[in-house]
Image (cartoon, rainbow, N blue to C red):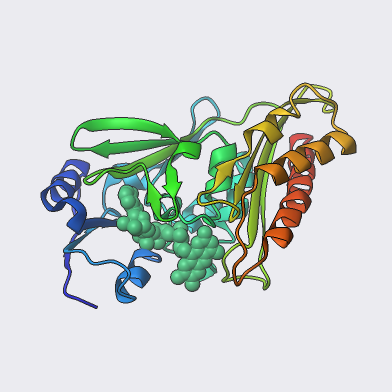
Amino acid sequence: MEYIDYEAPKTLSEALNLMASKGDRARAIAGGTDILVQLRGGRRSIDVLVDVKEIPELNELSYSPQNGLVLGAAVPCYRIYQDQAVASAYPGLIDAASLIGGIQIQGRASIGGNLCNSAPSGDSIPPVIVLGGICNIAGPNGTRQVPAEDFCTGPGRNVLQDGEILVSVAIPAPVAHSGANYLRFIPRNEMDIAVVGVGTSVVLDDSGQNFVSARIALASVAPTPVLAKDAGDSLAGKPVSEANIQEASEKAMADAKPISDMRGTIRQRTHLVGVFTRRTLNNAIERARGG
Ligand SMILES: Cc1cc2nc3c(=O)[nH]c(=O)nc-3n(C[C@H](O)[C@H](O)[C@H](O)COP(=O)(O)OP(=O)(O)OC[C@H]3O[C@@H](n4cnc5c(N)ncnc54)[C@H](O)[C@@H]3O)c2cc1C
């Protein structure tokens, strides 16, 4: 590993100044579970790591039923699932936070880091997308907001410009009769990259028998995690039925653009998108009905 400076600013403005002074030779570090592996493996060369874990805005974890969730970009997974209020309001997010790596990784890894690493297989990205997450970004030119579905732009790439930091992700408060779920397929129980990941969220009407709206997002089947918009929209206003869920899963399969690699073939991945879309929709419906 080459020599790298390490800075741990205590304020956002200090961090932004550091990032700005080094341009593309500076990288943020949150949990370090991606960046340290990449630096050690020689996949990145930089001059300075800017540790963002001591910045208050990036450590915020606040939830209210009125305003929803503000999830600081450096908050590690374990803090999310150990927070009772957050865990009961966002079980779909907890599905992902509690399966990233293993218990040791969850002690460090953040959802912000998962987003900024921008792997097509990033497990937390589909749930953040279907829950309507908005990325709050700060940089030398001020702040901006980007919907989570527009954040990743390619494998390992995203909308962040040199000098910008992801500060937090804002997730709206769950509405009545809503539910979400994330599941992934991996060939072993943990510590693997998703062959396919599917996150879904639904809002049902008061009777619990009809969809008001639905969102479906896919991981590991395109250069970025993707919102399968047509698939989700196809359920709006329709009765909750096997036929309608099947139709949405077929639309999601059509939205998937997987490649064949050592983890799975195009055929297997496309099939799995169908299976996991149906499964996560049924789980989300059960949660929306209070199950
Ligand atoms: C053993 C092991 C198992 C793993 N298992 C999984 C898994 O099951 N599922 C999965 O999705 N991932 C997995 N990962 C990958 C990794 O743990 C996750 O992507 C994690 O969420 C990254 O978070 P972090 O805080 O550690 O990010 P870091 O490594 O600190 O950062 C990741 C990237 O984001 C940038 N960055 C971080 N924070 C910010 C910020 N606030 N603003 C701008 N840029 C930022 C960094 O510069 C870096 O490029 C695993 C990794 C290991 C080592």
Indicate the position of residue 168 as horizontal and vertical percent values.
Answer: 38, 41
Residue visible at 61% across and 31% down? 174
Taking depth in this image into account, of 267 and 6 the one nearest to the observer is 267
Up/down of 268 relative to 246, above or below: below
Residue visible at 62% across and 50% down? 257
The image quarter containing residue 193 is bottom right
Taking depth in this image into account, of 71 and 16 the one nearest to the observer is 16
Left-right relation of 256 to 143: right
Indicate the position of residue 265 as horizontal and vertical percent values.
Answer: 67, 64
Residue 31 shows up from this direction? no
* Residue reaching furthest to the left: 21
Up/down of 268 relative to 15, above or below: below
- Quarter of the picture containing the C terminus is top right
The image quarter containing residue 212 is top right
Ligand 1 rendered quadrant: bottom left
- Quarter of the picture containing the N terminus is bottom left
Residue 14 shows up from this direction? yes
Indicate the position of residue 55 as horizontal and vertical percent values.
Answer: 26, 48
